[in-house]
Image: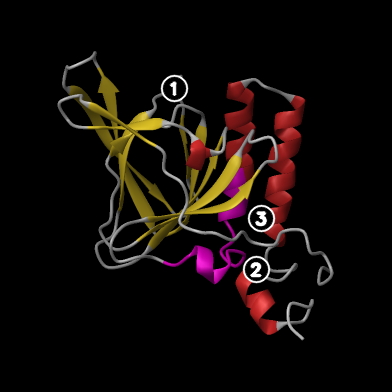
Amino acid sequence: MTGGRNDPEALRAGGSAREIGPLREFVRAIAQLIRTTDDEETIVTKGARLLGTLVAEDTWLPEEYARPDPSRYQQYLLHCDSEERFSVVSFVWGPGQSTPIHDHRVWGLVGILRGAERSRAFVRQGHGEPLLAGPEERLDRGQVGVVSPRLGDIHRVSNAFEDRVSISIHVYGANIGAVSRATYDPDGNAKKFVSGYANRTLPNLWDLSGAP
């Protein structure tokens, strides 16, 4: 018999109730925050503090949502609200991997769980005009950044390391894998895309049989 509360494969795949507890409590806290306000500034300010607490601890992320791929960065869905008001994602960066220039169309929080990321912001001047590049910023382990159409929404992100994996935990104000967004060429040409996710299963946040 497999799949029970003490099944080793089930625990290894989903994480035990004790191990994954910080993610479960974070999801509950973000859901409560969004229930109480729709003010973006309040959400990102308080949400950033919650995410900072989550990424300060590096023991809760199940192994299969921390695996790099040699061909490209991986985007694993960890949780999506049933009304798609927010989603939580782990981004796993192999050595030297990076995104194209892209936007989000919703607010987002980025917290560094392992390693570090570099991000360069861009501004779109107008249709057919080149993008303006801003300064490059670096986020190290435990730090949290914010993106949104209001604050700045176009950037390119890369692993700050050429010799190791980095992992960041992202929270977005939508089911980000289903949002129609765009990548951009430096000349300003936009191409629509929907990112989807790398995984077909989710961590089991809600089996509390092994919780203290």
Stretch in magenta? 51-67
- Residues at circles 1 and 2 in contact by the CB criterion of under 8 Å: no
Please name the residue that numbered disc 1 is placed on: 149
Farthest residue to the top: give it.
126
Q: Residue at x 28, y 50 (%)?
A: 98
Residue 167: x, y in percent? 44, 58
Residue 37: x, y in percent? 71, 23
Circle 3 Cα neighbour tier, 10 Å, few/some/many (<14 / 14–19 / ≥20): many
Q: Residue at x 52, y 63 (%)?
A: 65
Mark identifier at residue 14: 2
Task: Tell whether 132 sits left or right of 138.
Answer: left
**Was residue 56 drawn as part of the magenta stretch in this picture?**
yes
- Camera sees residue 103: no
Question: Which of the image's four quarters has the N terminus?
Answer: bottom right
Q: Amino acid at mark 3?
A: Leu
Q: Secondary structure at mark 2?
A: helix
**Whole-number angstrom distance, CA of label 1 to CA of label 3:** 27 Å
**Whole-number angstrom distance, CA of label 1 to CA of label 2:** 34 Å
Q: Amino acid at mark 1?
A: Pro
- Tell me: residue 27, above or below residue 122: below
Residue 142: x, y in percent? 50, 52
Question: Which of the image's four quarters has the C terminus?
Answer: bottom right
